[in-house]
Amino acid sequence: MVDKSQIEQTFRKYFYTESSAAVEVDDQGLVTVINSYNVDLLSNYHHTHLPVKFKSISGSLRLDNNTLTSLEGCPEVVPGFFDCSDNHLTSLVGGPTHVGAQLGNMGYYAAMFTQAHPLQSLDGLPETVAGTLYVSYTTELALLGLCLVKKHEVHFTDTGSDKIDNSRDVSQDMIDDHLKYMHPHLSDLQDLFNQPDHQGPGGVLRMASAMSDLEAEWGEGSLGRNASL
């Protein structure tokens, strides 16, 4: 039998949410957060797994700037935005499958990582993002799976910056300016992923062909493992 009171105490110890939020714990020990716009994992948590497992939340979920190695325990649906950036994750397995589902195109999914801890796989990508999917670009990531995510757009960021450290204070303009300096052709790849005919299962083959043409322009081997699932 689960200790519901202890699980709620653990949630309140390690997560910030509004004072108006209601927290419920079911018989399986899963946490539901009601009447909350933001659920934020505190940056001083410093463990590899989430302190509680979620059943559902009513707003956004921020897990960024921590030491997580797993997203196990995330709710399946995050109605607002989801941010797991700057952790020690190697994949996105365990993360939500639907983001921004109840807030139109206001949602986003952010998976931006530092050079010290780059993402190694896009396994676990959400099925839908009602907004923008932010992904750190490296030549080691197999990117074609991005075509299978129902989304408004993909936006690439960069893992190799000394200035862009994925902190909560970094603006998108700073990231964009950095990318133009470090990767002057990366916007071409981003534009390809955002073309309507490169979406869905049929778009995967078309995107693979387009990436082959782009690699011919950039130079052999420039895309690394990008053109694979």
Image (spheres, rainbow, N blue to C red):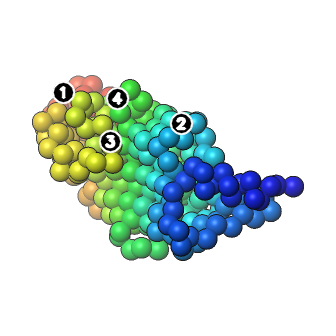
Q: Is mark 4 on a helix, strand or loop?
A: loop
Per the model, the C-alpha gap separating discs 4 and 3 is 11 Å
In the rendered image, residue 140, in percent from the top left (x then y), is placed at 37, 30
- The nearer-to-camera label among 4 and 1 is 4
Residue 46 numbered mark, or none: 2
Residue under circle 1? 219
Q: Which residue lies furthest to the right in this view?
A: 1
Amino acid type shown at disc 1: Gly
Sequence-wise, the earlier of marks 4 and 1 is 4
Per the model, the C-alpha gap separating discs 1 and 3 is 29 Å
Q: For mark 1, does the 10 Å Cα neighbourhood hold few (<14), some (14 to 19), or many (20 or more) residues?
A: few
Sequence-wise, the earlier of marks 1 and 3 is 3
In the rendered image, residue 99, in percent from the top left (x then y), is placed at 46, 62
- The nearer-to-camera label among 1 and 3 is 3
Residue under circle 4? 115
Amino acid type shown at disc 2: His
- Depth check, front residue: 193 or 92: 92
- Disc 2 vs disc 3: Cβ atoms closer than 8 Å? no
Residue under circle 3? 166
Per the model, the C-alpha gap separating discs 4 and 2 is 19 Å
Amino acid type shown at disc 4: Gln
In the rendered image, residue 47, in percent from the top left (x then y), is placed at 58, 36
Q: Residue at x 82, y 55 (%)?
A: 2
- The nearer-to-camera label among 2 and 3 is 2
32 horizontally vs 103: left or right:
right
Q: Is residue 205 visible?
A: no
Q: Quadrant of residue 7?
A: bottom right
Per the model, the C-alpha gap separating discs 1 and 2 is 41 Å
27 horizontally vs 182: left or right:
right
